[in-house]
Image (cartoon, rainbow, N blue to C red):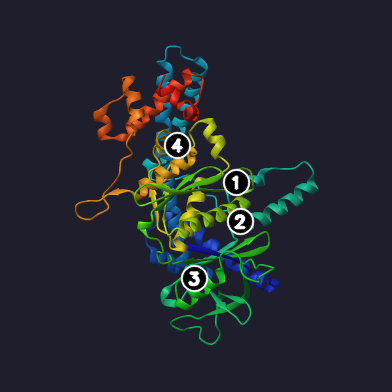
Amino acid sequence: MKTTIFGVLPDVTPEHDTVLRRLMRKYGLMLRFAFKRWVEGLSNVGALERHLPSDTTLPLRYAKDAVQEAQDLIRARHQAMQDGLALWTQRAKKTRERLTALRGSLHPNGRRIAGQERKLAHQEERQGFYQQHVEAGTFPPVVFGTKKRWLERFKILDDPIAEQARQQAWREAWEESRNGRLSARGDRTKQGNPLLRVREGADHWLLEISLDSLKPGKPDAKVPRYEKLEIPLYIARKVSKKTGQVNGRHYEDLLRRTLAAGDPYQVEILRRQGRYQVRITVEEAPAPIQTDPRQGWVGVDTNRTFLALCHVLSNGNPHAFATIGDPRLFDVRSTQRDALVGGLAVETVQWAKARRAGLVVEDLQFIHDRDVSAKFNRVTHQFNYRALLTAVERQAAREGVTLRKVKPAYTSIIGRFKYQPQYGISVHHAAALVIGRRGGLKVPGSDGSPGKVRRENVPKALRLWMQDRDQWNDPTYRKNDWSAWARIKRIMTKTLASHHQYLSAWLGYRKTLFFE
Protein backbone atom coordinates (compact mmCIF):
# COMPACT_ATOMS: atom_id res chain seq x y z
CA MET A 1 0.00 0.00 0.00
CA LYS A 2 1.10 3.57 -0.69
CA THR A 3 1.89 5.90 2.20
CA THR A 4 2.52 9.64 1.92
CA ILE A 5 5.12 11.25 4.19
CA PHE A 6 4.66 14.98 4.75
CA GLY A 7 7.47 17.49 5.12
CA VAL A 8 8.38 21.12 4.52
CA LEU A 9 11.35 23.12 3.26
CA PRO A 10 11.92 25.39 6.30
CA ASP A 11 15.03 27.30 5.17
CA VAL A 12 14.37 28.57 1.65
CA THR A 13 16.55 31.55 0.77
CA PRO A 14 15.44 34.17 -1.80
CA GLU A 15 17.82 32.60 -4.32
CA HIS A 16 16.33 29.14 -3.72
CA ASP A 17 12.83 30.61 -3.97
CA THR A 18 13.63 32.08 -7.38
CA VAL A 19 14.97 28.74 -8.63
CA LEU A 20 11.97 26.76 -7.34
CA ARG A 21 9.51 29.21 -8.86
CA ARG A 22 11.26 28.89 -12.23
CA LEU A 23 11.22 25.10 -12.14
CA MET A 24 7.56 24.98 -11.13
CA ARG A 25 6.58 27.43 -13.86
CA LYS A 26 8.33 25.32 -16.49
CA TYR A 27 6.82 22.09 -15.17
CA GLY A 28 3.34 23.63 -15.24
CA LEU A 29 3.96 24.79 -18.81
CA MET A 30 4.96 21.27 -19.89
CA LEU A 31 1.93 19.74 -18.21
CA ARG A 32 -0.53 22.13 -19.85
CA PHE A 33 1.18 21.83 -23.24
CA ALA A 34 1.09 18.02 -23.12
CA PHE A 35 -2.53 18.05 -21.98
CA LYS A 36 -3.55 20.32 -24.84
CA ARG A 37 -1.73 18.23 -27.45
CA TRP A 38 -3.38 15.02 -26.19
CA VAL A 39 -6.82 16.64 -26.31
CA GLU A 40 -6.13 17.69 -29.90
CA GLY A 41 -5.38 14.08 -30.82
CA LEU A 42 -1.60 13.80 -30.73
CA SER A 43 -0.47 10.17 -30.39
CA ASN A 44 3.34 10.34 -30.74
CA VAL A 45 4.50 10.17 -27.13
CA GLY A 46 8.21 10.10 -27.92
CA ALA A 47 8.12 13.21 -30.10
CA LEU A 48 6.21 15.12 -27.41
CA GLU A 49 8.63 14.05 -24.67
CA ARG A 50 11.63 15.16 -26.79
CA HIS A 51 10.03 18.48 -27.71
CA LEU A 52 9.29 19.66 -24.18
CA PRO A 53 12.90 19.68 -22.86
CA SER A 54 14.06 21.66 -25.90
CA ASP A 55 11.69 24.49 -24.97
CA THR A 56 12.15 24.44 -21.18
CA THR A 57 15.76 23.14 -20.84
CA LEU A 58 14.52 20.79 -18.11
CA PRO A 59 15.78 17.19 -17.89
CA LEU A 60 13.99 14.65 -20.05
CA ARG A 61 12.62 12.84 -16.99
CA TYR A 62 10.63 15.92 -15.98
CA ALA A 63 9.05 15.89 -19.45
CA LYS A 64 8.21 12.20 -19.19
CA ASP A 65 6.52 12.77 -15.84
CA ALA A 66 4.54 15.74 -17.19
CA VAL A 67 3.34 13.75 -20.22
CA GLN A 68 2.36 10.79 -18.04
CA GLU A 69 0.48 13.09 -15.66
CA ALA A 70 -1.39 14.67 -18.58
CA GLN A 71 -2.40 11.24 -19.86
CA ASP A 72 -3.61 10.21 -16.39
CA LEU A 73 -5.63 13.42 -16.10
CA ILE A 74 -7.34 12.82 -19.44
CA ARG A 75 -8.18 9.22 -18.53
CA ALA A 76 -9.57 10.42 -15.21
CA ARG A 77 -11.79 12.99 -16.93
CA HIS A 78 -13.18 10.38 -19.35
CA GLN A 79 -13.84 8.03 -16.44
CA ALA A 80 -15.57 10.84 -14.56
CA MET A 81 -17.95 11.31 -17.50
CA GLN A 82 -18.83 7.61 -17.50
CA ASP A 83 -19.32 7.54 -13.73
CA GLY A 84 -21.48 10.64 -13.90
CA LEU A 85 -23.65 9.11 -16.61
CA ALA A 86 -24.16 5.92 -14.60
CA LEU A 87 -24.94 7.88 -11.43
CA TRP A 88 -27.51 10.25 -12.93
CA THR A 89 -29.09 7.44 -14.95
CA GLN A 90 -29.63 5.49 -11.73
CA ARG A 91 -31.01 8.54 -9.94
CA ALA A 92 -33.43 9.32 -12.78
CA LYS A 93 -34.61 5.71 -12.80
CA LYS A 94 -35.35 5.79 -9.06
CA THR A 95 -37.20 9.08 -9.39
CA ARG A 96 -39.36 7.73 -12.25
CA GLU A 97 -40.31 4.72 -10.13
CA ARG A 98 -41.14 6.97 -7.19
CA LEU A 99 -43.16 9.29 -9.43
CA THR A 100 -45.12 6.37 -10.91
CA ALA A 101 -45.97 5.11 -7.43
CA LEU A 102 -47.15 8.57 -6.35
CA ARG A 103 -49.36 8.99 -9.38
CA GLY A 104 -50.90 5.54 -8.91
CA SER A 105 -51.68 5.94 -5.21
CA LEU A 106 -55.25 6.15 -3.94
CA HIS A 107 -54.78 9.71 -2.70
CA PRO A 108 -52.14 11.37 -4.92
CA ASN A 109 -50.36 14.33 -3.39
CA GLY A 110 -50.04 17.05 -6.03
CA ARG A 111 -47.31 18.90 -4.16
CA ARG A 112 -45.09 15.84 -3.86
CA ILE A 113 -45.73 14.90 -7.49
CA ALA A 114 -44.73 18.37 -8.66
CA GLY A 115 -41.55 18.19 -6.57
CA GLN A 116 -40.61 14.81 -8.02
CA GLU A 117 -41.26 16.10 -11.54
CA ARG A 118 -38.88 19.02 -10.99
CA LYS A 119 -36.28 16.65 -9.57
CA LEU A 120 -36.67 14.31 -12.56
CA ALA A 121 -36.26 17.19 -15.01
CA HIS A 122 -33.00 18.23 -13.31
CA GLN A 123 -31.71 14.65 -13.25
CA GLU A 124 -32.52 14.08 -16.92
CA GLU A 125 -30.71 17.31 -17.76
CA ARG A 126 -27.59 16.11 -15.92
CA GLN A 127 -27.92 12.68 -17.52
CA GLY A 128 -28.05 14.25 -20.99
CA PHE A 129 -24.99 16.38 -20.21
CA TYR A 130 -22.85 13.37 -19.33
CA GLN A 131 -24.30 11.21 -22.10
CA GLN A 132 -23.40 13.83 -24.69
CA HIS A 133 -19.77 13.84 -23.57
CA VAL A 134 -19.56 10.04 -23.36
CA GLU A 135 -20.93 9.57 -26.86
CA ALA A 136 -18.61 12.22 -28.30
CA GLY A 137 -15.58 11.04 -26.29
CA THR A 138 -15.06 14.52 -24.80
CA PHE A 139 -15.21 16.22 -21.42
CA PRO A 140 -15.78 19.80 -20.18
CA PRO A 141 -12.86 22.25 -20.38
CA VAL A 142 -10.25 21.88 -17.66
CA VAL A 143 -9.02 25.01 -15.88
CA PHE A 144 -5.51 24.60 -14.48
CA GLY A 145 -5.62 26.69 -11.32
CA THR A 146 -9.27 25.87 -10.51
CA LYS A 147 -12.34 27.38 -12.11
CA LYS A 148 -13.39 29.02 -8.86
CA ARG A 149 -10.20 31.07 -8.67
CA TRP A 150 -10.44 32.00 -12.32
CA LEU A 151 -13.96 33.39 -11.84
CA GLU A 152 -12.74 35.48 -8.91
CA ARG A 153 -10.82 37.58 -11.41
CA PHE A 154 -14.03 39.17 -12.70
CA LYS A 155 -15.31 40.37 -9.32
CA ILE A 156 -14.66 44.13 -9.35
CA LEU A 157 -14.76 46.32 -6.23
CA ASP A 158 -16.02 49.90 -6.24
CA ASP A 159 -12.98 51.28 -4.43
CA PRO A 160 -10.07 51.61 -6.95
CA ILE A 161 -7.38 51.21 -4.28
CA ALA A 162 -9.03 48.13 -2.80
CA GLU A 163 -9.56 46.75 -6.29
CA GLN A 164 -5.88 47.17 -7.15
CA ALA A 165 -4.85 45.34 -3.97
CA ARG A 166 -7.39 42.59 -4.68
CA GLN A 167 -6.08 42.13 -8.21
CA GLN A 168 -2.51 41.88 -6.94
CA ALA A 169 -3.51 39.27 -4.36
CA TRP A 170 -5.44 37.39 -7.03
CA ARG A 171 -2.44 37.28 -9.39
CA GLU A 172 -0.24 35.82 -6.66
CA ALA A 173 -2.86 33.22 -5.71
CA TRP A 174 -3.49 32.35 -9.37
CA GLU A 175 0.21 31.92 -10.08
CA GLU A 176 0.61 29.74 -7.00
CA SER A 177 -2.31 27.46 -7.85
CA ARG A 178 -1.44 27.25 -11.55
CA ASN A 179 2.36 27.03 -11.37
CA GLY A 180 3.01 26.01 -7.78
CA ARG A 181 3.86 22.34 -8.17
CA LEU A 182 6.88 20.22 -9.11
CA SER A 183 6.65 16.43 -9.22
CA ALA A 184 8.89 13.53 -10.14
CA ARG A 185 8.24 9.79 -10.14
CA GLY A 186 10.56 7.24 -8.67
CA ASP A 187 12.77 4.80 -10.56
CA ARG A 188 14.01 1.52 -9.13
CA THR A 189 16.96 1.39 -11.54
CA LYS A 190 18.13 4.78 -10.20
CA GLN A 191 17.84 3.76 -6.53
CA GLY A 192 14.85 5.91 -5.65
CA ASN A 193 14.19 9.21 -7.40
CA PRO A 194 16.86 10.68 -9.72
CA LEU A 195 15.30 14.16 -10.04
CA LEU A 196 14.08 14.88 -6.50
CA ARG A 197 16.28 12.72 -4.32
CA VAL A 198 15.91 12.57 -0.53
CA ARG A 199 19.10 12.04 1.44
CA GLU A 200 19.84 11.86 5.15
CA GLY A 201 22.51 14.21 6.41
CA ALA A 202 24.38 14.22 9.69
CA ASP A 203 21.59 15.81 11.73
CA HIS A 204 18.87 16.63 9.20
CA TRP A 205 17.32 15.54 5.92
CA LEU A 206 18.21 16.99 2.52
CA LEU A 207 16.25 17.28 -0.73
CA GLU A 208 18.45 17.20 -3.83
CA ILE A 209 16.70 18.91 -6.77
CA SER A 210 17.83 18.56 -10.39
CA LEU A 211 17.92 22.01 -12.05
CA ASP A 212 17.41 23.18 -15.63
CA SER A 213 21.07 24.00 -16.29
CA LEU A 214 23.81 21.62 -17.39
CA LYS A 215 26.99 21.08 -15.43
CA PRO A 216 29.93 23.05 -16.85
CA GLY A 217 32.67 21.25 -18.68
CA LYS A 218 30.74 18.68 -20.78
CA PRO A 219 27.95 20.46 -22.67
CA ASP A 220 28.03 17.93 -25.53
CA ALA A 221 28.05 14.76 -23.42
CA LYS A 222 25.92 11.85 -24.64
CA VAL A 223 24.16 11.71 -21.28
CA PRO A 224 23.72 15.30 -20.05
CA ARG A 225 24.45 16.02 -16.42
CA TYR A 226 22.40 18.68 -14.71
CA GLU A 227 23.30 20.83 -11.76
CA LYS A 228 21.84 20.00 -8.35
CA LEU A 229 20.41 22.12 -5.58
CA GLU A 230 20.36 20.86 -1.98
CA ILE A 231 17.79 22.28 0.44
CA PRO A 232 17.24 21.17 4.07
CA LEU A 233 14.08 19.09 4.49
CA TYR A 234 12.03 18.64 7.64
CA ILE A 235 9.97 15.44 7.99
CA ALA A 236 6.86 15.85 10.11
CA ARG A 237 6.92 14.03 13.45
CA LYS A 238 5.41 14.42 16.90
CA VAL A 239 7.78 13.86 19.81
CA SER A 240 6.42 13.33 23.32
CA LYS A 241 7.60 15.94 25.82
CA LYS A 242 7.60 13.36 28.64
CA THR A 243 9.30 10.34 27.08
CA GLY A 244 11.08 11.88 24.08
CA GLN A 245 9.67 9.13 21.87
CA VAL A 246 7.85 9.69 18.60
CA ASN A 247 4.09 9.40 18.99
CA GLY A 248 2.12 7.62 16.29
CA ARG A 249 3.75 6.55 13.05
CA HIS A 250 7.53 6.95 12.85
CA TYR A 251 7.69 8.17 9.25
CA GLU A 252 11.42 8.83 9.39
CA ASP A 253 12.11 5.14 10.00
CA LEU A 254 9.81 4.23 7.10
CA LEU A 255 11.70 6.64 4.84
CA ARG A 256 15.06 5.23 5.98
CA ARG A 257 13.96 1.69 5.14
CA THR A 258 12.80 2.82 1.70
CA LEU A 259 16.10 4.57 0.97
CA ALA A 260 18.18 1.66 2.28
CA ALA A 261 16.31 -0.82 0.07
CA GLY A 262 16.62 1.40 -3.01
CA ASP A 263 12.86 1.34 -3.58
CA PRO A 264 11.32 4.01 -5.83
CA TYR A 265 9.44 6.89 -4.25
CA GLN A 266 7.58 9.86 -5.68
CA VAL A 267 8.31 13.39 -4.51
CA GLU A 268 5.98 16.35 -4.96
CA ILE A 269 6.81 19.95 -3.99
CA LEU A 270 3.85 22.30 -3.50
CA ARG A 271 4.00 26.05 -2.97
CA ARG A 272 1.14 27.06 -0.66
CA GLN A 273 0.81 30.53 0.83
CA GLY A 274 4.48 31.24 0.31
CA ARG A 275 5.68 28.03 1.98
CA TYR A 276 7.00 24.90 0.30
CA GLN A 277 5.38 21.62 1.28
CA VAL A 278 6.89 18.25 0.34
CA ARG A 279 4.98 15.00 -0.09
CA ILE A 280 6.96 11.79 -0.40
CA THR A 281 4.93 8.76 -1.46
CA VAL A 282 6.48 5.36 -0.72
CA GLU A 283 5.29 1.79 -1.02
CA GLU A 284 4.73 0.33 2.44
CA ALA A 285 4.83 -3.44 2.69
CA PRO A 286 2.13 -5.07 4.87
CA ALA A 287 3.27 -6.66 8.12
CA PRO A 288 3.30 -10.47 8.49
CA ILE A 289 -0.07 -11.94 9.47
CA GLN A 290 -0.34 -12.37 13.24
CA THR A 291 -3.95 -13.55 13.51
CA ASP A 292 -5.36 -17.08 13.53
CA PRO A 293 -8.76 -17.98 11.98
CA ARG A 294 -9.24 -20.51 14.77
CA GLN A 295 -9.46 -17.59 17.21
CA GLY A 296 -12.51 -16.26 15.39
CA TRP A 297 -13.29 -12.90 13.79
CA VAL A 298 -14.21 -9.43 15.00
CA GLY A 299 -17.25 -7.97 13.26
CA VAL A 300 -17.27 -4.18 12.89
CA ASP A 301 -20.54 -2.26 12.54
CA THR A 302 -19.90 1.28 11.28
CA ASN A 303 -21.91 4.18 12.68
CA ARG A 304 -21.57 7.94 12.41
CA THR A 305 -19.77 8.47 15.76
CA PHE A 306 -18.62 5.02 16.89
CA LEU A 307 -17.77 1.46 15.90
CA ALA A 308 -19.60 -1.49 17.45
CA LEU A 309 -17.36 -4.56 17.75
CA CYS A 310 -18.20 -8.20 18.40
CA HIS A 311 -15.67 -11.01 18.77
CA VAL A 312 -17.24 -14.07 17.13
CA LEU A 313 -15.67 -17.43 17.90
CA SER A 314 -14.95 -20.00 15.22
CA ASN A 315 -18.21 -21.78 16.07
CA GLY A 316 -20.24 -18.62 15.45
CA ASN A 317 -21.02 -17.72 19.07
CA PRO A 318 -20.26 -14.22 20.43
CA HIS A 319 -17.43 -13.97 22.94
CA ALA A 320 -17.02 -10.24 23.68
CA PHE A 321 -18.50 -6.88 22.74
CA ALA A 322 -16.99 -3.39 22.65
CA THR A 323 -17.84 0.14 21.55
CA ILE A 324 -15.09 2.40 20.24
CA GLY A 325 -16.04 5.93 19.30
CA ASP A 326 -15.96 9.64 19.94
CA PRO A 327 -19.06 11.89 19.98
CA ARG A 328 -16.99 14.73 18.50
CA LEU A 329 -16.80 12.97 15.13
CA PHE A 330 -20.13 14.48 14.15
CA ASP A 331 -19.28 18.18 14.56
CA VAL A 332 -15.50 18.79 14.56
CA ARG A 333 -13.44 20.22 11.74
CA SER A 334 -12.15 17.95 9.01
CA THR A 335 -8.53 18.10 10.23
CA GLN A 336 -9.57 17.15 13.77
CA ARG A 337 -11.84 14.43 12.41
CA ASP A 338 -8.93 12.86 10.53
CA ALA A 339 -6.94 12.64 13.76
CA LEU A 340 -9.90 11.13 15.62
CA VAL A 341 -10.50 8.61 12.83
CA GLY A 342 -6.87 7.51 13.00
CA GLY A 343 -7.12 6.99 16.75
CA LEU A 344 -10.31 4.94 16.43
CA ALA A 345 -8.71 2.78 13.76
CA VAL A 346 -5.72 2.06 16.02
CA GLU A 347 -8.00 1.11 18.94
CA THR A 348 -10.12 -1.15 16.75
CA VAL A 349 -7.17 -3.04 15.29
CA GLN A 350 -5.47 -3.39 18.67
CA TRP A 351 -8.70 -4.82 20.17
CA ALA A 352 -8.79 -7.49 17.48
CA LYS A 353 -5.04 -8.12 17.58
CA ALA A 354 -5.14 -8.74 21.34
CA ARG A 355 -7.54 -11.62 20.63
CA ARG A 356 -5.54 -12.81 17.60
CA ALA A 357 -8.74 -12.50 15.56
CA GLY A 358 -9.19 -11.05 12.09
CA LEU A 359 -11.47 -8.15 11.22
CA VAL A 360 -14.68 -8.27 9.17
CA VAL A 361 -15.99 -4.92 7.92
CA GLU A 362 -18.85 -3.84 5.68
CA ASP A 363 -18.17 -3.30 2.00
CA LEU A 364 -20.20 -0.09 1.76
CA GLN A 365 -21.03 1.06 -1.77
CA PHE A 366 -23.60 3.84 -1.18
CA ILE A 367 -21.18 6.66 -0.39
CA HIS A 368 -21.24 8.45 -3.78
CA ASP A 369 -25.01 8.18 -4.29
CA ARG A 370 -26.38 11.28 -2.56
CA ASP A 371 -29.92 11.02 -3.97
CA VAL A 372 -31.35 9.60 -0.77
CA SER A 373 -33.73 10.74 1.94
CA ALA A 374 -33.29 14.07 3.69
CA LYS A 375 -32.78 12.29 7.01
CA PHE A 376 -29.96 10.17 5.59
CA ASN A 377 -28.30 13.29 4.16
CA ARG A 378 -28.41 15.00 7.55
CA VAL A 379 -26.86 11.98 9.23
CA THR A 380 -24.03 11.37 6.78
CA HIS A 381 -23.13 14.69 5.20
CA GLN A 382 -20.61 15.60 7.91
CA PHE A 383 -18.95 12.21 8.22
CA ASN A 384 -17.44 9.96 5.60
CA TYR A 385 -17.79 6.27 6.38
CA ARG A 386 -15.19 5.45 3.78
CA ALA A 387 -12.54 7.44 5.68
CA LEU A 388 -13.06 5.37 8.83
CA LEU A 389 -13.13 2.02 7.02
CA THR A 390 -10.07 2.95 4.96
CA ALA A 391 -8.19 3.90 8.13
CA VAL A 392 -9.09 0.55 9.71
CA GLU A 393 -8.00 -1.32 6.59
CA ARG A 394 -4.61 0.44 6.46
CA GLN A 395 -3.97 -0.01 10.17
CA ALA A 396 -4.85 -3.71 9.93
CA ALA A 397 -2.28 -4.16 7.14
CA ARG A 398 0.37 -2.40 9.27
CA GLU A 399 -0.36 -4.56 12.32
CA GLY A 400 -0.63 -7.88 10.47
CA VAL A 401 -4.36 -8.33 11.14
CA THR A 402 -6.37 -10.14 8.47
CA LEU A 403 -9.29 -8.10 7.12
CA ARG A 404 -12.30 -9.28 5.14
CA LYS A 405 -15.12 -7.31 3.51
CA VAL A 406 -18.68 -8.60 3.36
CA LYS A 407 -21.96 -7.33 1.94
CA PRO A 408 -23.79 -5.17 4.49
CA ALA A 409 -27.27 -6.21 3.32
CA TYR A 410 -29.76 -6.82 6.17
CA THR A 411 -27.09 -7.03 8.88
CA SER A 412 -29.02 -4.64 11.16
CA ILE A 413 -32.34 -6.35 10.39
CA ILE A 414 -31.02 -9.83 11.14
CA GLY A 415 -29.27 -8.60 14.27
CA ARG A 416 -32.37 -6.79 15.52
CA PHE A 417 -34.84 -9.66 15.04
CA LYS A 418 -32.59 -12.64 15.75
CA TYR A 419 -29.70 -11.80 18.10
CA GLN A 420 -30.81 -8.70 20.02
CA PRO A 421 -33.51 -10.53 22.03
CA GLN A 422 -31.35 -13.64 22.36
CA TYR A 423 -28.35 -11.91 23.97
CA GLY A 424 -29.94 -8.69 25.26
CA ILE A 425 -27.53 -6.44 23.35
CA SER A 426 -27.91 -3.25 21.36
CA VAL A 427 -28.88 -3.40 17.70
CA HIS A 428 -25.41 -2.16 16.73
CA HIS A 429 -23.64 -5.00 18.56
CA ALA A 430 -26.18 -7.42 17.08
CA ALA A 431 -25.31 -6.13 13.59
CA ALA A 432 -21.60 -6.54 14.40
CA LEU A 433 -22.33 -10.13 15.41
CA VAL A 434 -24.01 -10.78 12.04
CA ILE A 435 -21.09 -9.18 10.19
CA GLY A 436 -18.58 -11.31 12.10
CA ARG A 437 -20.55 -14.49 11.39
CA ARG A 438 -20.95 -13.57 7.72
CA GLY A 439 -17.22 -13.09 7.29
CA GLY A 440 -16.02 -15.94 9.47
CA LEU A 441 -18.51 -18.79 9.12
CA LYS A 442 -18.18 -20.71 5.89
CA VAL A 443 -19.65 -23.95 4.63
CA PRO A 444 -16.53 -25.94 3.57
CA GLY A 445 -16.45 -27.07 -0.03
CA SER A 446 -15.77 -30.60 -1.18
CA ASP A 447 -12.39 -29.55 -2.58
CA GLY A 448 -11.26 -28.06 0.71
CA SER A 449 -12.16 -24.47 -0.22
CA PRO A 450 -13.91 -22.20 2.31
CA GLY A 451 -17.11 -22.45 0.31
CA LYS A 452 -20.20 -20.29 0.74
CA VAL A 453 -21.31 -18.16 3.67
CA ARG A 454 -23.61 -19.89 6.12
CA ARG A 455 -27.24 -18.80 6.08
CA GLU A 456 -28.92 -16.84 8.87
CA ASN A 457 -32.03 -18.90 9.61
CA VAL A 458 -35.17 -17.18 10.82
CA PRO A 459 -36.02 -18.06 14.46
CA LYS A 460 -38.93 -20.46 14.90
CA ALA A 461 -41.09 -18.01 16.91
CA LEU A 462 -40.72 -15.32 14.27
CA ARG A 463 -41.40 -17.79 11.46
CA LEU A 464 -44.62 -19.02 13.12
CA TRP A 465 -45.72 -15.41 13.67
CA MET A 466 -45.30 -14.75 9.96
CA GLN A 467 -47.17 -17.96 9.03
CA ASP A 468 -50.14 -16.88 11.15
CA ARG A 469 -50.40 -13.79 8.97
CA ASP A 470 -50.06 -15.72 5.67
CA GLN A 471 -46.89 -13.76 4.93
CA TRP A 472 -44.47 -16.70 4.81
CA ASN A 473 -43.21 -18.20 1.56
CA ASP A 474 -41.22 -21.32 2.40
CA PRO A 475 -39.85 -22.04 -1.14
CA THR A 476 -38.61 -18.46 -1.47
CA TYR A 477 -37.04 -18.62 1.98
CA ARG A 478 -35.20 -21.83 1.17
CA LYS A 479 -33.83 -20.24 -2.00
CA ASN A 480 -32.87 -16.84 -0.57
CA ASP A 481 -33.18 -15.96 3.10
CA TRP A 482 -32.52 -12.25 2.49
CA SER A 483 -35.91 -11.85 0.80
CA ALA A 484 -37.51 -13.41 3.90
CA TRP A 485 -35.77 -10.92 6.18
CA ALA A 486 -36.94 -8.07 3.93
CA ARG A 487 -40.52 -9.31 4.20
CA ILE A 488 -40.21 -9.65 7.98
CA LYS A 489 -39.01 -6.05 8.26
CA ARG A 490 -41.88 -4.77 6.12
CA ILE A 491 -44.62 -6.65 8.01
CA MET A 492 -43.13 -5.88 11.44
CA THR A 493 -42.91 -2.17 10.61
CA LYS A 494 -46.60 -2.08 9.65
CA THR A 495 -47.59 -4.06 12.75
CA LEU A 496 -45.70 -1.79 15.11
CA ALA A 497 -47.12 1.26 13.34
CA SER A 498 -50.62 -0.03 14.20
CA HIS A 499 -49.49 0.13 17.83
CA HIS A 500 -48.15 3.69 17.26
CA GLN A 501 -44.58 2.48 17.64
CA TYR A 502 -41.43 2.51 15.51
CA LEU A 503 -39.22 -0.44 14.58
CA SER A 504 -36.79 0.53 17.35
CA ALA A 505 -39.47 -0.51 19.91
CA TRP A 506 -39.46 -4.10 18.63
CA LEU A 507 -37.64 -5.56 21.63
CA GLY A 508 -40.12 -4.16 24.15
CA TYR A 509 -43.16 -5.28 22.12
CA ARG A 510 -41.77 -8.68 21.16
CA LYS A 511 -43.75 -10.78 23.64
CA THR A 512 -46.87 -8.71 23.14
CA LEU A 513 -46.78 -9.29 19.39
CA PHE A 514 -46.01 -12.99 19.58
CA PHE A 515 -48.72 -13.82 22.14
CA GLU A 516 -51.46 -11.35 21.24
Point out the tag, 4 or 3, that comes first from the N-terminus. 3
Mark toward the start of the polypeptide (1 vs 2):
2
Please tell me whether residue 67 is drawn above or below residue 434 in the rendered image. below
Residue type highlighted by circle 3:
Ser
Above or below, comparing residue 412 to residue 289 in the picture: above
Q: Secondary structure at mark 4?
A: helix
Identify the residue at image location x=60%, y=80%. 201
User: Separation of disc 1 and disc 4 at Cα?
Assistant: 26 Å
- Callout 1 environment at 10 Å: few (<14), some (14 to 19), or many (20+)? many
Q: Closer to the N terminus: mark 1 or mark 3? A: 3
Separation of marks 1 and 2 at Cα, in angstroms: 31 Å
- The residue where tag 2 is placed is 177
Instruction: Decide: is 262 above or below 348.
Output: below
Query: Residue 325 location, x and y as percent?
Result: 57, 48
Camera-nearest label, 1 or 2? 1
Q: Amino acid at mark 2?
A: Ser
Please provide percent x and percent y for residue 416: 44, 35
Compute the Cα span from label 4 to label 3: 71 Å
First in sequence: mark 1 or mark 4? 1
Within 10 angstroms of label 4, few (less than 14), some, or many (20 or more) residues? many
Q: Amino acid at mark 4?
A: Gln
Tag 4 residue? 420
Relative horizontal placement of residue 214, taking residue 442 as reference (left or right): right
Mark nearer the N terminus (3 vs 2): 3
